[in-house]
Image (tube, rainbow, N blue to C red):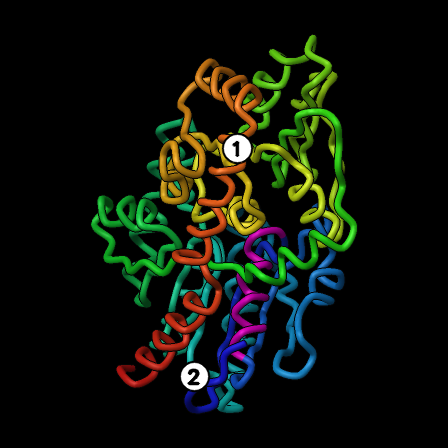
Amino acid sequence: MIFIGTYMKIVHVVEPFASGIATFVQSIVQNLRDDHHIVIHGERECVMRSAEVIKYFPEDNVQFIRWRSAQRSISLVKDTAALVELCQLLKNLKAKKMVDAVHLHSSKSGFLGRLACRLTNIPNVIYTPNGAPFLLSNVNAMNLLYKLFEKLGSAFGGKVVCSSRSEQTAYRKLGIRALNINNGISISENRNAAKLNPVSTARFRIVTSARIVQQKDPALFNDIAACFKDFDQFEFIWVGDGEDRHLLTAPNITITGWLPQAEVLRLIDGANLYLSTSQYEGLSFSVLEALSLRKTVLLKDCIGNRDIVRKGLNGDLFTSKQEAIVKIFQYYNNPAMLQVMGEYSGWLCHKEFNVDATCLLYRDLYKRVVINK
């Protein structure tokens, strides 16, 4: 927990108030306890109701305001309504002198939020994408549209803060100035939660934890698992749920659905290997949790993931299904190597992805944008 400096009022704007984005906002609120946080949020009931997300936040330094018009899909009519509502919410907070800095989370909030701040004359704005949307689609026209939105959004003002160096590089290639502050997690809290009731198995368990959506490439996860369906000693677990659940058809895959965080950590702690098939990431909290629990990680080579792996030291990157399969067999046949790699994962997480360092850097950035506004 961090206590520094002068009291500030931070407004967080977040449309997908679930999964990694919610974890990110919660970690800032939890660790910057001397500040007051106002979270303007949308609702993703298909993932987790906001009432359930709010339970993980402290009670003494945060308040929540529902952003009722916000929704995931791109729609001129609905997004215009969301913009008007957000402008009114920010205008009301500004009139009450409740805005020192505005922190926007994810691409939809980043675009509408920067425009709303420009329209309400709020210059002290930070935008954290937590995953660049222009890296997702295989359709070039869609990626060009996302790039256009990011460039247009940057013209409205604010500082772009990427959660990994490779994401920062992607934004700079677009001609968008961006800073980098690595995501971080509480290492000791994760280990303590996981050890309360460990979930063990005699089989070689391979786990991922994420929404089952296109970005996470469940089809690739399924293809990898299907190659092991005749080997009873292997099991695959997907912790989470989502709209592409139907793509996970291999008989050796267990889909748990959404679970309490402590249960997620226990499942990861009981795994032999953490596997990510994502097409892109900001910097995955689930992978960082695996590092904190001293797990070897096998990650698809993509933006965000490549910042976490030290090849051959705490895991490996792969570019194809065949590479992943070969690596899994290598890990299975070398349990001592898994142990050594896992220890390096824990050390790396403490050194480079510690939540205390992350929140100190964001607190300093909040102060700077207020001073320079």
- Furthest residue toward front: 336
Of the numbered discs in the image, which one, if any, rests on residue 101?
none
Image-based side of 82 in relation to 127, left or right = right
Establish if 188 lies above or below 304.
Answer: below
- Furthest residue toward right: 197
The segment highlighted magenta reads 19-32
- Magenta stretch holds residue 28: yes
Q: Position of residue 115 (x, y in %)?
A: 40, 65
Location of mark 2 (residue)? 100
Q: Is residue 263 something that shows in the picture?
A: yes
Residue at image position (67%, 49%) is 265
Name the residue nearer the viewer: 337 or 319: 337
Q: Quadrant of residue 235?
A: top right
Establish if 285 lies above or below 318.
Answer: below
Q: Position of residue 334 (x, y in %)?
A: 53, 23
Q: Secondary structure at mark 2?
A: loop
Q: Secondary structure at mark 1?
A: helix
Q: Position of residue 297 (x, y in %)?
A: 50, 36
Q: Are marks 1 and 2 in contact (CB under 8 Å)?
A: no
Name the kind of residue labelled 2 in the image.
Answer: Asp
Residue at image position (40%, 23%) is 319
Dot 2 alpha-carbon crowd within 10 angstroms: few under 14, some 14 to 19, many 20 or more: many
Dot 1 alpha-carbon crowd within 10 angstroms: few under 14, some 14 to 19, many 20 or more: many
Image-based side of 155 in relation to 9, left or right = left
Establish if 52 lies above or below 125.
Answer: above
Location of mark 1 (residue)? 338
Classified by dominant secondary structure, the portion drawn in magenta counts as helix
Residue at image position (65%, 42%) is 268
Residue at image position (36%, 33%) is 311
In front: label 1 or label 2: 1
Q: Is residue 111 something that shows in the picture?
A: no
